[in-house]
Image: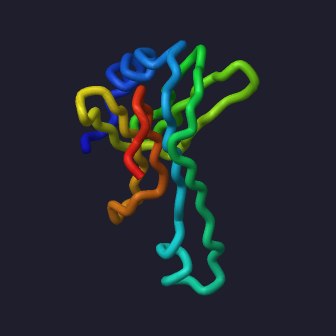
Amino acid sequence: MKSIEKEKVQEMLESFIDKDVYVHLETTNGAYASHFNDKAYNVGVYIRNTRVKFSQAKIVGDGNSYRAGLKMDIGWIYAEGLTDWEIYEDAKLLLAGHDREGRLMVALQLSETPFDY
């Protein structure tokens, strides 16, 4: 993966507008928190292959961390804390956020075809 290039990611996000796309969204501090601090809360979110259509997509951030948002007819999907990105299998977009040790904290993937499970 490489550091987010805001203009390129924005262009890729816009390529999915008004299409039926599959979303994978995952957040975790999981084992990272509970193994090192017994008072830490273990939290996470995981959805995969949820099909949505959005009319607007935007990535914003300061160069260290980014937030990507997808506007649907009746709500939003967004992921915050994104640091890295890549395009794989020619058309799937992966946005991810890693902590200082390189551990995954958040992932947002978009594709016109379902993800493997």
User: How far across and how far down the image is residue 108, in percent?
Assistant: 47, 41
Q: Residue furthest bottom?
A: 38
Q: Please say which color scheme the image uses.
A: rainbow
Q: Position of residue 6 (x, y in %)?
A: 38, 26
State the residue in front, 90 or 9. Answer: 90
Q: State the image quarter where residue 79 is shown.
A: top right
- Residue sitting farthest toward the right: 74
Residue 31 higher or lower than 54, as above or below: below
The residue that appears at 33% across and 60% down in the rendered structure is 102
> Residue at the location (57% across, 38% down)?
50
Residue 103 x %, y %: 38, 63
Give the position of the N terminus as an image quadrant: top left
The image shows residue 21, relative to residue 3, as above or below, that is above
Q: Residue at x 55, y 80 (%)?
A: 34
Q: Nearer the viewer, residue 104 or 75?
A: 75
Q: Residue at 66% across / 22% down in the picture?
A: 72
Figure label count: 0
Q: Is residue 89 above or below residue 44?
A: above
Q: Is residue 60 above or below residue 19?
A: below
The reply, left or right, for residue 86 in relation to residue 64 is left
Residue 89 lies, in percent from the top left, at 24, 34
